[in-house]
Image (cartoon, rainbow, N blue to C red):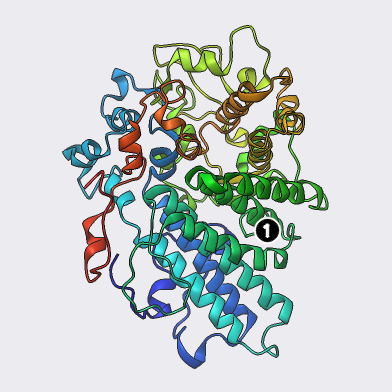
């Protein structure tokens, strides 16, 4: 990582992606630094929206970030001859990231296939730095300019965005440099990722209650940090830590259960599982099931690139101008998730009749924006869901099963099963743990969770679960991470790269 230096707020606040929704369409203000800024609540709001925009840039600027890092690695995904140019699918399935990054077809700067961008962590550190600035500057403002309660909420949002960025970096790079001071000028080494997560968990615990359960302004629901956003982030961080700090796993699992209970029982009606028939409402955004999401709208200036939207990969005519889907999954995998004789409304509502096809005609309707219709080649305009309520319930079920509290684990996972009209689980022990794992695969398919679940559970090394199992020695040497670009070494003698890839 380049040595972090003092930067002018004006030049960093509004760079990158612009426009996320009306409340993110901010107008650049001259002279943001110094005495002309941090005078009013409006100044704070402007800067805060800029930090959210930075996170949008970090995750959506590279057009395939969620798909490449979360959905396709070690997954049974395929392409047809119609999509012969999509070679990256094979690289990701085989976990051959060096091959992917060396392939000249993906190196042209003018293309949207620049997977090397994922090796750069600078965009995430832009979020961290500005979140740190937000926290400090708001804290220094007098209460004549901003109320104590507003100050606490903005600082809580800053902590959430900082910790969310660290969590994303941990899952992609492993150990990362960690800092929380506003204007860091010190070259830093990489910090053990479990330590990073513990620090973030402590910081989140201190501020989460300063976030509202939801917002009266519908435009903010799910797209601004809520208490539910904080709780599910903490649940995910604890589950990741449990996978890499085995000696303390039971403590992490118990904490996840406690956080899940708080999320479910104290949310004052802010969150709920929507009926399965309203799946489209979840992904359009702003629903009671959404806990945190990245905005996309119909406006051409506020859309992700088509390659960023998972739905565009798994549709064909009349939704896309193709006879086959860009990616389709092995029939054996789909039969594992949805046996032919088993009733599950996700199978009938989220997929067409070719769910088990091996010719590329399999397609997934889960993310279709029903309001758009079926115009061929039209980008599916939905929010990018980062966390949702069903995800939290399944994390709680998994933690309960790991604690051998099978009856409670069944109760949690069967909430999701009942919503899908599927038979409830009665299994126990390892069978229940497997059932919950595959329920996460079913429920969260295409939401950027698949590979991360393989990694944190160590199932990535087991051919029973991973379609390209990673050897144990390779896994322990970092084969689950992404390579880190060599630019991270500039001006920082303390940085090391990921040994497996470099």
- Give whichever of 46, 485 is nearer the camera: 485
Residue 331 x, y percent position in the rendering: 46, 13
Q: Which residue is mark 1?
A: 226
Q: Quadrant of residue 160?
A: bottom right
Between residue 9 and residue 338, name the one nearer to us.
Answer: 338
Image position of 378 (left or right of 207): left
Q: Is residue 262 left or right of residue 478?
A: right
Image point (40%, 45%), residue name:
65
Q: Residue furthest bottom?
A: 35
Q: Residue furthest top?
A: 341
Residue 275 percent location from the top left of the image: 75, 32
Asked if one can make out residue 27 in the rendered structure from this viewpoint, the answer is no
Quadrant that contains the N terminus: bottom left
Image position, residue 326 (x, y; %): 38, 26
Inspect this view and state whether residue 209 appears: yes
Instruction: State whether residue 178 is above or below residue 150.
Output: above
Query: Residue 3 is drawn in which quadrant?
Result: bottom left
Could you tell me which residue is drawn at 41 percent across and 58 percent down? 192
Q: Is residue 149 above or below residue 383?
A: below
- Snapshot quadrant of residue 169: bottom left
- Identity of the residue drawn at 35% across and 79% down: 185
Q: Residue at x 65, y 63 (%)?
A: 205
Rendered view: 312 above or below 336: below
The front one of 315 and 449 is 449
Mark 1 surroundings: few (<14), some (14-19) or many (≥20) residues within 10 A? many
Image spot of residue 265 (x, y percent): 81, 48
Q: Secondary structure at mark 1?
A: loop
């Amino acid at each position: 990582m380049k040595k972090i230096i003092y930067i002018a707020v004006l030049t960093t606040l509004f760079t990158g992606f612009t426009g996320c929704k009306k409340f993110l369409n901010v107008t650049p203000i001259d002279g943001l630094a110094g005495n002309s800024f941090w005078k009013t609540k409006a100044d704070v709001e402007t800067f805060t929206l800029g930090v959210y925009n930075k996170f949008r840039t970090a995750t959506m600027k590279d057009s395939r970030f969620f798909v490449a890092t979360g959905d396709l690695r070690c997954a049974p995904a395929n392409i047809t001859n119609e999509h012969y140019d999509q070679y990256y699918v094979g690289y990701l399935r085989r976990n051959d990231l060096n091959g992917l990054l060396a392939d000249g077809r993906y190196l042209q700067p003018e293309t949207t296939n620049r997977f090397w961008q994922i090796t750069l962590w600078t965009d995430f550190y832009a979020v961290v730095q500005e979140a740190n600035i937000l926290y400090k500057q708001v804290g220094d403002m007098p209460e004549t300019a901003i109320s104590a309660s507003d100050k606490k909420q903005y600082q809580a949002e800053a902590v959430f965005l900082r910790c969310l960025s660290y969590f994303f970096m941990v899952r992609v790079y492993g150990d990362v440099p960690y800092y929380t001071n506003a204007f860091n000028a010190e070259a830093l080494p990489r910090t053990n990722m479990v330590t990073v997560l513990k620090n973030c968990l402590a910081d989140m615990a201190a501020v989460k209650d300063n976030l509202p359960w939801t917002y009266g302004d519908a435009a903010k629901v799910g797209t601004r940090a809520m208490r539910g956003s904080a709780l599910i982030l903490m649940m995910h961080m604890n589950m990741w830590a449990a996978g890499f700090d085995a000696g303390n796993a039971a403590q992490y699992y118990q904490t996840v259960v406690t956080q899940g209970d708080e999320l479910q029982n104290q949310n004052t009606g802010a969150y709920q599982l929507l009926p399965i028939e309203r799946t489209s409402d979840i992904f359009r955004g702003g629903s009671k099931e959404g806990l945190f999401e990245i905005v996309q709208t119909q406006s051409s200036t506020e859309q992700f690139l088509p390659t960023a939207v998972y739905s565009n990969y798994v549709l064909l005519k009349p939704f896309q101008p193709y006879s086959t889907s860009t990616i389709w999954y092995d029939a054996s995998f789909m039969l594992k998730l949805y046996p032919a004789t088993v009733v599950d409304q996700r199978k009938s509502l989220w997929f067409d009749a070719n769910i088990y096809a091996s010719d590329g005609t399999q397609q997934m309707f889960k993310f279709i924006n029903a309001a758009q219709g079926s115009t061929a080649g039209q980008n599916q305009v939905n929010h990018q869901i980062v966390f949702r309520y069903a995800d939290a319930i399944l994390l709680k079920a998994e933690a309960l099963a790991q604690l051998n509290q099978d009856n409670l684990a069944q109760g949690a996972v069967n909430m999701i099963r009942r919503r899908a009209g599927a038979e409830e689980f009665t299994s126990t022990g390892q069978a229940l743990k497997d059932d919950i794992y595959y329920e996460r695969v079913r429920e969260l398919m295409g939401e950027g969770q698949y590979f991360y679940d393989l990694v944190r559970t160590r199932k990535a090394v087991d051919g029973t679960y991973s379609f390209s199992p990673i050897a144990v020695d390779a896994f322990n040497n970092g084969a689950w991470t992404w390579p880190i670009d060599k630019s991270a070494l500039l001006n920082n003698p303390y940085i090391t790269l990921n040994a497996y890839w470099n």
